[in-house]
Image (tube, rainbow, N blue to C red):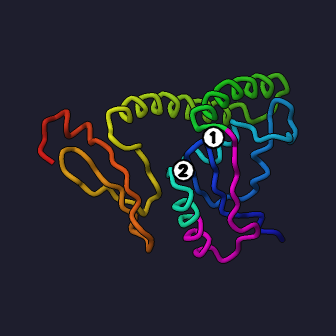
Amino acid sequence: MSADNGVYILKTGNQYRVKHLQAIDNLYWDYCKTQFQNTIVPTRIFEMFCDCKYTYNCETAFKIANNIFKKLSICEYGIQLIDTNMSWGMVLKRARIHINKEIEQCRNNNVDVVDDLKLLKQELDNTYSNKKKVNKKQSLCSDKFCTICENAEWINCGNGYYKLKCKLDYESYTSCQIDFNKRKAGEKQ
């Protein structure tokens, strides 16, 4: 029996998301046509990678992928890069449009995934609106806001700026973010 798994690095514009997944071919499944497509379906990108943190650094993404890979007892497809040729924002926009078509098509064909797609649509809408809020915050920060993985922690650099440091065995990834909540409340750092 096949493990049908791999560690995948999704490249969206200048962001890299890393995740261990099975059945990666589902990225090409389209409920509108109820068959696999020749191109990646934005709704499936969101569905499979929405819970991933991201980095702007390709080398860091491969290091994270390698760390995940080392922990797996079986990994059939190894580490693979998937380039979408779209930014994450474009993926979200296209997925928001496409999921409505998928819901309608499934409803018309009595396909029993409508409720799951509605939940996914709600999560997609929440992510999209949160992304808009984050983008507004990004413009106030001197560097790009970036998250890596659960092994990362924010180190207080003072004046409301934080540096992201990965606790794994490779170098720190430097980026900063203003802690808006503390700054707004007037708390000392």
Mark 2, other Cα within 10 Å: few <14 / some 14–19 / many ≥20: some
Question: What span is in magenta?
Answer: 65-85
Q: Earlier in the sequence, mark 2 or mark 1?
A: 1
Residue visible at 66% across and 31% down in the picture: 95
Relative horizontal placement of residue 66, taking residue 101 as reference (left or right): left
> Residue 24's quadrant in the figure?
bottom right
Residue visible at 53% across and 64% down in the picture: 64
Residue visible at 59% across and 70% down in the picture: 66
The three-letter amino acid code for the residue at tag 2 is Cys
Task: Say above or below: 110 vs 38.
Answer: above
Q: CA distance from mark 2 to mark 1?
A: 10 Å
Q: Is residue 81 magenta?
A: yes
Q: Quadrant of the N terminus?
A: bottom right
Tag of residue 52: 2
Q: Which residue is mark 1?
A: 46
| Residue 128 percent location from the top left of the image | 52, 30
Relative horizontal placement of residue 61, taking residue 34 as reference (left or right): left
Task: Say above or below: 163 vs 35.
Answer: below
Residue visible at 37% across and 44% down in the picture: 143
Mark 1, other Cα within 10 Å: few <14 / some 14–19 / many ≥20: many
Q: Secondary structure at mark 1?
A: helix
| Residue 156 percent location from the top left of the image | 23, 54
> Residue 177's quadrant in the figure?
top left
Q: Secondary structure at mark 2?
A: loop
The three-letter amino acid code for the residue at tag 1 is Phe
Of residues 70 and 173, the one drawn nearer to the viewer in this rendering: 173
